[in-house]
Image: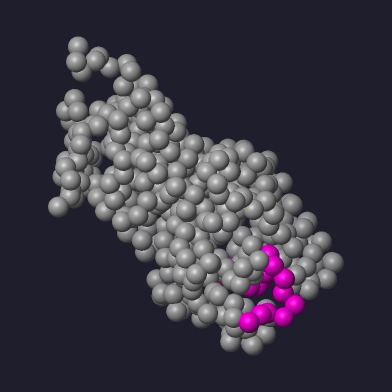
Amino acid sequence: MASPIPDVDVAVIGAGAAGLAAARRVQELGHSTLVLEARGRAGGRAWTVEPHPGLPVDLGCGWLHSADRNPWTEIARTTGFAVEERLPAWGGRLAAAGMDAAAQQSWTLSRERFYDQLAAVVPPDGPASALLEPGDRWNAMLDAIGTWVSGAELDQVSRLDLKRYADSGINWRVAEGYGRLIVRHGDGLPVRLACPVRQVDWRGTAIAVETDAGKVTAQAVIVTVPTNLLALGALRFTPDLPAAKLNAAAGLPLGADEKLYFRITGDIAGVGPETYRLGSPDRTRTAGYLVKPLGRPLVEAYVGGNLARELAAAGPDAFAAFALDELAGLFGSDIRKRLVPLAASAWTRDPWSLGAYSYAKPGHADDRAILAAPVDDRLFFAGEATSADSFSTAHGAYLSGRRSAEEAAAALSRRPSRTG
């Protein structure tokens, strides 16, 4: 029998990076808190699994993006996690594929032209695909990369929002797994797992949070629920959230990005650690491959956009078949005998996220600020989708969680004492 749920100053909905960061900051500020998590595990869209002994893999976030200023970097070091500081060789995919210098230079010029135009974007907003040069040889590759960055093809993505993303270019990894690091950050926090929140009733002075395990009463609530669930009304609010808030959630859907890992048996001749390859530079519907990440006998396949959504729906066998076909084209058919599927994500089918991370639809770049804004000085909102310039990242989620905790604590300090 589950223990009774205590009443608290601040209830936090969701035990992902944002929710755990929020709860820890609430405690630091001297308030009681409880994190309510629908899944049977903490971490949210940060999830490290170990499908083979000694081979941890991240099915969710895997890179310490902007690692030189990413707060998770210092958290990792202070908690004993190993930070791998090798930069990814993403720019070397074409050279690794054996393309000549002329092709590589052509790609570099097209990529730089696209990002120069992106940097120069001013309102009004529009689709990022409008920045592609008509007929350019490399448009499909730019679009494929766009699906990995945003989880959607460039014609679905706001160019103004994409411009606002801040990236230092320093990308590192956590050797034990990013997901494990984020879960570790929750150690010692009051977290109730397998406890979906069904309704937030904020009609009274106190807020009633209805869960499958009973009701908790709080003076403030921090909501870190993914935008897809907010937009669908999967979490009920009484009274309803303002229309602007719900419209903002709908304008910032979670895109589709999925991973699949193979274990390498034997060896792949001539292929060293940290080898990056592209399934095909000539189509958007292709995967990026990382062979022997951190020197481990693994291949990571990464897909985005419509392809990711379709492969997740078809299941891990279909995903593996697609990846094996591309890998055989890259390394020869013998590779099929050397790869054993280990684990695959399916974030678009996960009922508690329905996607990977947020992108802004064209015309919705300003929705992030609307989504982040408190309601009635009692409901507060966090999560990577609320970040102005670090959306789609675990550090954006972390910073948003701390921001929401500080907003909630400030609001509580403005209220009359409950004992006075």
Q: List x then y, in percent, for residue 410.
A: 37, 21
Q: Nearer the viewer, residue 240 or 77?
A: 77
The image quadrant where one finds the C terminus is top left
Q: Does residue 152 appear in this view?
A: no
User: What range of the chain is rendered magenta?
Assistant: 266-285
- Residue appearing at x 52%, y 47% in the figure: 393
Q: Work out which residue is located at the far right of the displayed protein and give it.
A: 101
Task: Tell me residue 351's x, y (percent).
Answer: 32, 59
Whether residue 112 appears in this view of the structure is yes
Q: Is residue 337 left or right of residue 404?
A: right
Residue 369 found in image quarter: top left
Is the magenta region chiefly helix, strand or loop? loop
Q: Which residue is drawn at 61% across and 50% down?
A: 83
Reply above or below: 337 against 326. Answer: below
Image side of residue 102 versus residue 267, left or right: right
- Left or right: residue 95 versus residue 289 is right
Residue lying at 43% horizontally and 38% vertically, measured from the top left: 21
Q: In which quarter of the image is residue 188?
A: top left
Magenta run includes residue 284: yes
Q: Any magenta on residue 265?
A: no
